[in-house]
Image (cartoon, helix red, strand yellow):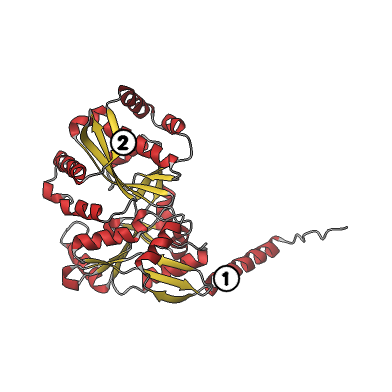
C-alpha cells in the first residue's frame, strides 16, 4: 500500500502554515471562557488542594485560616472557585487584608508573600492559565500582591504572553530524585563532610515536636536567634502565631526539632502538600551552628520527605540575602523563579509615588519584564 508523502512547499508556504497554526492555537485559547465564579467551601478547597500536583501548603485553606485566626479577621479568606466553559474548575486562594482603615485594602494571593495563584485537580492548559491570569490582574476590586508559583506548569508562560512586569525573586529547591546517600553525595564537599561527621558523633537528633512545651522551647530558640540577627524580640513573630499553628490540628504543618545531647537547640517549621515540602521558618542557637545542627536538620528532613514520596524540598526565597542563598546552594539546591506581581489601585499608586518622593523604603517598586528575569536566572 502506497503512502501519501507530505507536501514540502516553499519557505513562504511554511510561514503561512506556521501563521495559521498560531492563529488556530490563539483561537483555541480564546475559546475557553470563565463561566462561573463562586466561593468554595473549606472542604471543597481542601480536597482540590490535596489533589493538585503543583500545590504548596500556602495554597491550602489551612494557611488562610491560620492568618485569619491570628489577625482576628484583619486578614480573611476571599478564595474563589472558577468554572470554565469546558467544565474544568480551579480554585484561586485569596486573602483580603485590611490596610489603613480600609483605604488601602489589598488582596494577597497568599499571606506573607508566599506562593499564590490557582490550583486544580483538572488538567489545565495555557488557555485556562491565560483566563485566570487576566482575571487576577483586571477583575479584583482592590490591589493585589502575588508571588508566582514556580511549580505551576503554565503560570510563567502565561506571564510571558501577557508581558508581565514583576519584582525579581527566586527560591532554592532540592529535587528528591535519588536515594539518601546519593542526595548527600551531591552536596558541596564541606557541607557533606560536616553532616557525615555530625551523624557519626551521634549527638544530634531530629524529631517532630509533640507538646506545647516543645513548641515553647523552639520559640525561645527563635527569640535568641532574633537577637543574634540584630533584631528586638518584638520585631519577630509573636508566640500567639505559634499557638494558632498548634490549634489548627493540621498534620501537614510539622515543627521539626534539632536536639544536641538531648537539648532543643534548633528547629525548622515545614509545610507539606501533595508533592511539595516547604521550610517556612527556622532558628538555631548561635553556639550550636558550629556543631552543624541546622545542616543535619535539613538533610534528615529531606530524607524523611524522600521516603514519604515527596518530590521537592523547597528552602524558600532568601529575602534577597546573598549569604542565605549561598548556604542553600551547599545542598545542591537549584534556583527557581518566584517573582512578585503587584496590581495597585489608583489610590495605592498615588501613595507609592508620595512615599517614593519622600525616600521611604518600598515606596517605589523595582519592576522588570518577566522575560528579563527568567533569562537572568
- Horizontal arrangement in the rendering, residue 371 relative to residue 244 (left or right): right
For the N terminus, the quadrant is bottom right
- 199 lies above or below 126: above
Q: Which residue is mark 2?
A: 297
CA distance separating discs 2 and 1: 48 Å
Query: Among all residues in the image, which is located at the extreme right?
Result: 1
Q: Nearer the viewer, residue 371 or 237?
A: 237
Q: Nearer the viewer, residue 255 or 85?
A: 255
Among the two numbered marks 2 and 1 on one chain, the one whose residue lies closer to the N terminus: 1
- Horizontal arrangement in the rendering, residue 215 relative to residue 22 (left or right): left
- Where is residue 275 shown, x and y percent of the image? 44, 49
- Where is residue 288 shown, x and y percent of the image? 21, 30
Res 249 → quadrant: bottom left
Q: Residue at x 46, y 72 (%)?
A: 83
Q: Is residue 363 visible?
A: no
Q: Residue at x 44, y 60 (%)?
A: 155
Is disc 2 placed on a helix, strand or loop? helix
Q: Residue at x 40, y 42 (%)?
A: 305
Q: Which residue is mark 1?
A: 28
- 371 lies above or below 312: below
Is disc 1 placed on a helix, strand or loop? helix
For label 2, the crowd category at 10 Å Cα-Cα, with few meaning under 14, some 14 to 19 and many 20 or more, is many
Q: Nearer the viewer, residue 354 or 157?
A: 157
Amino acid at each position: 500500500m502506497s503512502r501519501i508523502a507530505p507536501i514540502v512547499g516553499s519557505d513562504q508556504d511554511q510561514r503561512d502554515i506556521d501563521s495559521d497554526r498560531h492563529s488556530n492555537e490563539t483561537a483555541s485559547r480564546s475559546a475557553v471562557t470563565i463561566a462561573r465564579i463562586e466561593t468554595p467551601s473549606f472542604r471543597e478547597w481542601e480536597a482540590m488542594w490535596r489533589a493538585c500536583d503543583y500545590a504548596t501548603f500556602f495554597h491550602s485553606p489551612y494557611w488562610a485560616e491560620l492568618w485569619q485566626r491570628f489577625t482576628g479577621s484583619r486578614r480573611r479568606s476571599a478564595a474563589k472557585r472558577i468554572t470554565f466553559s469546558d467544565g474544568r474548575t480551579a480554585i484561586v486562594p485569596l486573602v483580603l487584608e485590611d490596610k489603613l482603615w480600609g483605604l488601602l485594602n489589598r488582596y494577597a494571593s497568599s499571606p506573607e508573600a508566599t506562593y499564590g495563584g490557582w490550583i486544580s485537580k483538572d488538567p489545565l492548559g495555557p488557555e485556562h492559565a491565560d483566563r485566570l491570569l487576566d482575571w487576577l490582574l483586571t477583575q479584583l476590586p482592590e490591589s493585589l500582591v502575588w508571588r508566582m508559583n514556580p511549580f505551576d506548569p503554565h503560570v510563567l508562560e502565561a506571564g510571558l504572553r501577557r508581558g508581565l512586569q514583576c519584582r525579581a525573586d527566586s527560591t532554592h529547591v532540592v529535587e528528591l530524585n535519588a536515594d539518601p546517600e546519593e542526595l548527600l553525595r551531591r552536596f558541596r564537599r564541606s557541607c557533606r563532610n560536616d553532616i557525615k561527621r555530625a551523624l557519626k558523633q551521634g549527638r544530634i537528633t531530629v524529631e517532630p515536636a509533640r507538646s506545647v512545651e516543645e513548641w515553647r522551647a523552639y520559640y525561645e530558640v527563635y527569640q535568641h536567634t532574633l537577637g543574634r540577627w540584630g533584631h528586638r524580640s518584638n520585631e519577630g513573630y509573636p508566640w500567639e502565631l505559634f499557638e494558632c499553628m498548634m490549634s489548627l490540628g493540621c498534620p501537614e504543618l510539622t515543627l521539626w526539632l534539632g536536639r544536641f545531647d538531648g537539648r532543643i537547640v534548633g528547629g525548622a517549621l515545614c509545610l507539606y502538600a501533595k508533592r511539595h515540602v516547604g521550610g517556612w521558618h527556622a532558628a538555631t542557637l548561635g553556639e550550636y551552628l558550629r556543631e552543624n545542627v541546622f545542616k543535619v536538620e535539613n538533610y534528615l528532613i529531606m530524607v524523611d520527605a524522600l521516603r514519604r514520596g515527596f518530590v521537592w524540598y523547597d528552602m524558600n526565597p532568601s529575602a534577597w540575602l546573598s549569604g542565605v542563598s549561598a548556604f542553600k546552594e551547599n545542598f545542591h539546591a537549584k534556583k527557581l523563579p518566584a517573582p512578585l506581581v503587584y496590581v495597585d489601585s489608583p489610590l495605592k499608586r498615588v501613595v507609592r509615588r508620595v512615599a517614593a518622593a519622600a525616600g521611604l523604603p518600598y515606596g517605589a517598586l523595582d519592576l522588570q519584564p518577566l522575560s528579563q528575569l527568567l533569562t537572568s536566572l
